[in-house]
Image (spheres, rainbow, N blue to C red):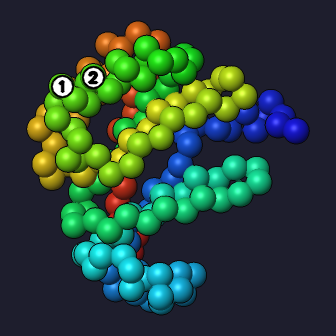
Amino acid sequence: MVTEEKIKEKKQISFGKLIDQARYKKTTSIPDKVKEKIAQTPYYLFIYIPSDEILKISVFPIKSARIKKILIRLKEFSPELVKGISEIMKKFNLGNSTIHTTGLCFEKINCYYETYVSIDDLPISLEKLRKEFLKVPRVEGVKIIDIQVTPT
């Protein structure tokens, strides 16, 4: 059962962690056979998506350490709202910069849409992008979170 306290604490869907190649190679929680299948890049973005039952971990090979997470708080999740967010992403050609995107509502409240982007090739300033997302009906807030390289 989800308590009110747990509902209030859900302020984002995922947590990102960026590590360099040396640290990635030392990671013992990923089998070597799996590591061999992932492209060799200077950095790796780990995205952790926790729930009460499981923890989903995704690993993305990344060329640059300049990663941001755009956290969009929604009044509710709807097809029109997703369309509005998608239109902004298309308008500013964010497809090449996007690493991972997800959206979720916790207990029909606390709805969020998140996207991790590489800002190396971002064709728009983060502040302008934040303001564009805020124009979408039923978007309540937009937060830009810096994903820094975890020290070795």
Q: Is residue 125 visible?
A: no
| Residue 134 left/right relative to 72 | left
Other-residue count near label 1 (Cα within 10 Å), few / some / many at <14 / 14–19 / ≥20: few
Residue 148: % across, % down: 35, 60
Which residue position is annotated with label 1? 91
Above-or-below relation of 136 to 111: above
**Element at label 1:** helix
Q: CA distance from mark 1 to mark 2?
A: 6 Å
- Furthest residue toward right: 1
**Element at label 2:** helix
Say which amino acid is labelled 1. Answer: Lys
| Residue 137 left/right relative to 51 | left
Q: Quadrant of residue 25?
A: bottom left
Q: Which mark is residue 121?
A: none
User: Residue drawn 80% across and 30% down?
Assistant: 4
Task: Say which quadrant the C terminus sits in.
Answer: bottom left
Q: Say whether marks 1 and 2 touch (CB < 8 Å).
A: yes
Q: Which mark is residue 87?
A: 2
Q: Quadrant of residue 139?
A: top left
User: Residue drawn 29% across and 46% down?
Assistant: 98
Closer to us: 84 or 52:
84
User: Residue drawn 25% across and 75% down?
Assistant: 41
